[in-house]
Amino acid sequence: MSKIIATAAIRGAHKILERALEKYEEAVKKFGKEAEIGFPNTAYYLPIIYAMLGYPVKRLGDCEEVLQEAKRLLPEIPSEKTWLPYLGPALDAGMATFFAEEIIEAIKYLEDPNVYTKTEEPLENNIWLGAADDVIFRKRGVEFVDGTAPGFAAILGAPPDKETAQRIAQELLEKNLYVFMHDQTNGIYMPYLLKEAGVQLGWPTRLIPFGPDYTSVVFAIGFACRVAMSFGGIKPGDYLGNLLYNKDRTFAFAITFGPVSDEWYANGAGAINWGFPVISDWDIPEIKPFGVCTYEHVVSKVPHKEIVDRAVEVRGLKVTAVKLDIPVSYAPAFEGERVRKDDLYLECGGGRSPAVELLLTGSLEEVEDGKIEVIGPEISDVEKLGIKGPPYVLPFAVVVKVAGVNMQEDFEAILERQFHHLVNYAQGIMHVGQRNIMWLRISKQAVEKGFQFVHVGRILYAKLRQEYGAIVDKCQVTIYTVEDKVREILELAKEVYEKRDARLAGLTDETVDVFYSCTLCQSFAPNHVCVITPERVGACGAYNWLDGKACYQINPTGPNQPIPKGELIDATLGQFTGVNEFVKQASRGAVERVSLYSILIDPMTVCGCMEGIAALLPSINGIMIVNRDYMGMTPTGMKFSTLAGMVGGGQVTPGFMGVSKHYLTSPKFLSSEGGLLRVVWMPKMLKEELRDKLQKRAEELGVPDLIEKIADETVATTEEEVRAWIEKVEHPVLKLPPLV
């Protein structure tokens, strides 16, 4: 390893640790050692420290022990004359750097709780987002599970101008990476350059301004540590497991712009511990031999035009970008982009005009493969129509006809649901809703680049043929922008939707012989197996029984496999011989039995992507539900994030279970314990979101006022308060038999 780099990194680590010690002493004098400390709304405490040492920093006084550990890790600054192997000491210095910086950042929150926005997007008066809370983390961390986001680029400093900044950010996004931004170069901050260029910042667009100081790099590394612990089943304190997990699975790297300070060297040494290499545009020493990183550790003097490709190459990330015949960039990273009013050129639907989307199955003879037709005005025609704008408004209907030897009517809704994200992947295009409540917005920038309605057709044709080639042999797309024809399609669509809904509603667990598995998340939770039935969708809410069936047809060796039910063991619990055999084999013997309808006996595992968690409240003989968007305390005395740590990673925890929102309204929901009648608490936001479906289920159970009898945070946040409430309203759980 380069002596120059090692010396600078160790010297920088000494400076950072000294800074942390000074901040700690000042904070103790001001707040006392008992002051609570940490990053807001997270169960991971200070995540790098927690992941590496297994030590939960809860109080300010806890920092002292960590700082002493950082001191022990920190080597002496290398002698000018004596040559020693420097890699190990430099990596230790990098680890000590991150421990010290996490404490510095935690003290910032203590000194000023609003130092960062704690939101998904920048505010008018503050661009810096700070550490991701658990709501953001669980929403975004899933993308590191399913491969939508292979990794991230941690940026230190900024290129010289907004054009370069925008181009580099665009290239990173096109490779599906998150971009985490920190610190400045000569007083220039990359997020401000992007904002000046009109680029949207925040978690939805994957451009994250973490903090204005180099110490905010710990938010990026901490995010990686949390992914390993939450989705990978890596236990706190298993430092080697966490480091290797991220080296093998999280394709991250650091890019630095401008002169590299000792402190930056120290952060670079820290990142290398995780297998994340450093790529710089500055003339600094390089570390070319392989070792901790997959390939080179430090690569320097890379031109701005080449820096993204070089970084991807050095990290070993294989990017298979799809080139479409459209004039705008196309990648999953653009899915969260919003087209706001000032940027809006044209919109369809969303209450402004009639709009609908529909996918139908045709015969091989009647579907003309590759035919894309626009009937009515194109986007380029609207200015000639005498319509007031911009923003202009047009009616819109898109009808996709597919044909295939293996295509079935049951797959129509599944393919149709893909329109949402497939269209959203186009930069400058925003798609909201589905069916006849869809809403399409086209930005001025997209129109300036030449985007037309025909390009929507090209996207749908290319992606449906590419991703669903196993069932789609032919595909054609027709787009209508004439109101009378749109309304005609709308009436047809309503008939089709009604038939589909009736077909799905008629499916029950008893009427099928086969369930489906989902092991999509086993790369992160090796022991987890999801069993999907007609009346129980996956805990993440993304896959129902028909989805599993379609995915198996599309990819017979994929994560969705048929599970023959076998013989019924226990109808009340929902145990079947075939299910147990499959789960035992697929979990490598870690899980021997699964009860599909019980929370107390052999409950099903989850990976960490669940929409909600059900938990037993023993003294009440009731069940509480909490959704992951709810950040408050629950009657268990734990927040969602803490509960998630108890059930995630493929653990079997009787009395606790991950659930989807849809499952809450199913007749099979915890039917072994009494189902919805057993639910005594859920957040008000969840109650309102599901009110219509919950009300229908309550009426089926003969308790039409059940929803009002379920407590929420407005009346109870402790088990004792829930007990008082259910007695006051005479909740039906009082008449149910004891659970334990």
Image: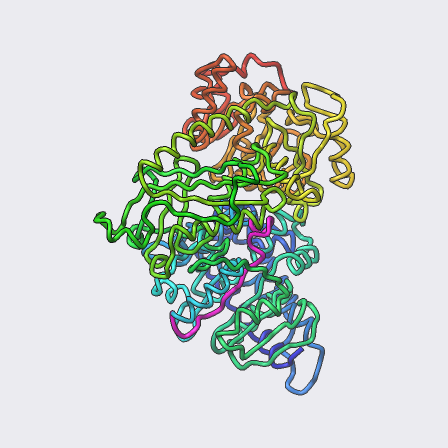
Residue at image x 50%, y 15%?
700
Is 381 included in the stretch rendered in magenta? no
Comparing 208 with 388, the one in front is: 388
Give the magenta-colored segment's residue range.
143-162
Could you tell me residue 146's position as x and y percent? 59, 48
Q: Which colour scheme is used?
A: rainbow
* Residue 599, above or below 34: above
Q: In this view, does 575 lie to the left or right of 71?
A: right
Give the quarter of the image for residue 98.
bottom right
Comparing 625 with 139, the one in front is: 139
Could you tell me residue 157's position as x and y percent? 46, 70
Residue, far front: 365
Could you tell me residue 651's position as x and y percent? 68, 38
Residue at image x 53%, y 63%?
153
* Residue 83, above or below 358: below
Comparing 256 with 273, the one in front is: 256
Q: Can residue 36 be seen in this view?
A: no
Q: In which quarter of the image is the N terminus?
A: bottom right
Is 157 included in the stretch rendered in magenta? yes
